[in-house]
Amino acid sequence: MAPVSWKREGSVAVVSLDNGENRHNPDFVREFLAALDEVEADAGACAVVIASSDPKSWSQGIDLQWMLPRVADPAGQDEIREFLRSLDRMFARVLTFPMPVIGALSGHTFGDGAILACCFDFRFVRADRGFFCFPEVDLNIPFLPGMMAIVKAAVPQPALNRWVLEGRRVPGPEMVDAGVATRAVEGADAVLAEAVAYAATFTKGRGIVKAIKQEMRGDILRVFEVDDPPNIAALRLMA
């Protein structure tokens, strides 16, 4: 099965992450970006919902089984650098996508998965199970500057300090209380249904949506361009 698939429900494109824990590696990024290109090419789509077909996980972040064997190999390190650059391209694509992007976070959303979710315009979560977590502080893995800029834009103080420095597992209702999620409902099916129903309310023009997003997220895009490249070149993977 391909790691990403999509279908249209009325005016809503539902992109499904279909690879179990939905960990991020080059194949995932390539397939995810291809799906977004196909969605944008569909003139009937007015909004996008990003969901998961796994009953437990939305996305568990970077695929360490792919990355760790490459850490000690110079050729592998070049692969990692290109992968990190591709993550920035993926984040930038979502941040400036010309339609509202809504996350249906029906399961665990950890690490790079949580960072990707922070790129969305709105997030719907489960009230009964599943956690949102930045475990980097426990794994001794620093955020790239662009990643931190994404998180800071989505998670307001003082929740930002607690979630990032404690590495705590945040339940859905707390995400709503912090203003990070729009709504928490019980059950994976309900999360998806609520997200799709909300997405169906959007009928704005793509041009103006993209222009507004580029202005809103311009500071993050500049971090991708200026601050991330030297950090990626140095390959600072561990603190």
Image: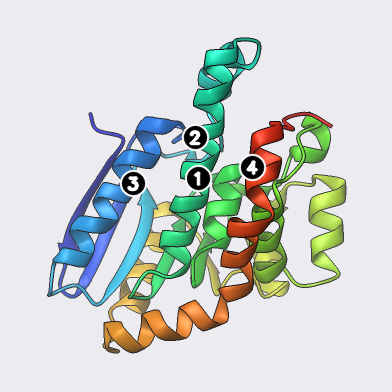
Label 3 sits on a secondary structure element that is helix
Distance Cα–Cα, label 1 vs label 3: 11 Å
**Three-letter residue code for mark 1:** Leu
Q: Earlier in the sequence, mark 2 or mark 4?
A: 2
Q: Is residue 36 left or right of residue 96?
A: left
Q: Is residue 75 above or below residue 191?
A: above
At 59% from the left edge and 57% from the top edge, which residue is drawn?
224
Reading the image, the residue beneath label 3 is 32
Residue on which the image places disc 2: 83
Crowding at mark 2 (Cα within 10 Å: few <14, some 14-19, many 20+): some
- Closest to the camera, between mark 4 and mark 3, is 3
User: What's the CA distance linking mark 4 and mark 3?
Assistant: 17 Å
Q: Are marks 2 and 1 in contact (CB under 8 Å)?
A: yes
- Mark 1 vs mark 4, foreground winner is 1
SS for dot 2: helix
Work out whether 96 lies above or below 57.
Answer: below
Which residue appears at 81% of the width and 65% of the height?
A: 159
Asked whether the residues under the numbered discs 2 and 4 touch, taking CB atoms below 8 Å apart as contact, a structural biologist would say: no
Q: Amino acid at mark 3?
A: Phe
Quadrant where the image shows the N terminus: top left
- Looking at the picture, which amino acid does disc 2 mark? Phe
